[in-house]
Image (tube, rainbow, N blue to C red):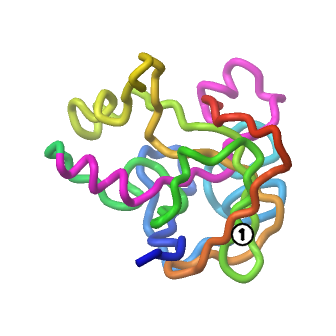
Amino acid sequence: MLMNPQVVAVGSSPVHAFSKDIASQINLLAGLGVDGDAHCGVTVQHRSRVALDPSQPNLRQVHLIHVELFEELAAQGFEVAPGQIGENITTCHLKLLALPVDSELHIGPSAIVRLTGLRNPCEQLNQFQPGLTAAVLGRTPEGQLVRKAGVMGVVVAGGVVRPGDAISLRLPAGPHRILERV
């Protein structure tokens, strides 16, 4: 049976914390990100990136992870729940990592998030649970690095997003570009 993509959980944090607080809803603001989240803004908000160049555009306004990753990690002995590794939106039945750059996720009644790239797993994952950074990295049969820690996007159209909201996908015109680290 084919399952429809949907939102499993949503979260945000007003401070630069590793985990996000799970909420009953979040409000996405066009061109900015998640209302009240520390990463909300037109320009980059990630602390290490601000230190390099605070004027660069914020391509990491919204962080999304597929719940299926948590199931994969559980099989390796890790316990990870929505929001714990920093995502704003946890999805299911959507192969986020396989989508091309500029894919648009239409979430709930009005929100649209355009994908910009992959989250680069960092050492903070190991501080959360030892060995987690390596667990969210893989290799293709050709030896290429695979980052599994979710995707990043920007808000094209704002709106409230809640658990249970449907997600529909609009692919960009080809040729498609694969998601890379942002």
**Quarter of the image containing the C terminus?**
top right
Q: Does residue 33 sit above or below 4 in this rendering?
A: above
Q: Give 8 or 29, whichever is nearer the viewer.
A: 8
The structure residue drawn at horizontal position 47% and vertical position 66%, both measured from the top left corner, is 93
Q: Nearer the viewer, residue 166 or 63?
A: 166
Q: Quarter holding the N terminus?
A: bottom left
- The tally of labels here is 1
Which residue occupies 66% across, 79% down? Answer: 108
Q: Is residue 69 magenta?
A: yes
Secondary structure state at the residue bearing disc 1: strand
- In terms of depth relative to the viewer, which is nearer, 56 or 180? 180
Q: Position of residue 51 (x, y in %)?
A: 67, 21
| The furthest residue to the left | 77
Residue of label 1: 106
Q: Amino acid at mark 1?
A: His
Establish if 2 lies above or below 99: below
Q: Residues within 10 Å of mark 1 (few under 14, many from 20)?
A: some
Residues in magenta?
A: 46-75
Q: Position of residue 4 (x, y in %)?
A: 53, 76
Q: Judge left or right: residue 11 versus residue 131.
A: right
The residue shown at (52%, 61%) is 94
Q: Where's residue 42, x and y in %?
A: 82, 45
Please indicate, yes or no, whether residue 12 appears anywhere in the rendered image: no
Q: Residue at x 76, y 65 (%)?
A: 112
- Can the viewer see residue 73? yes
Q: Is residue 26 above or below residue 44?
A: below
Membership of 19 in magenta stretch:
no
- Up the image or down, 30 lies above or below 61; here it is below
Residue 36 x/y as whole percent = 65, 62
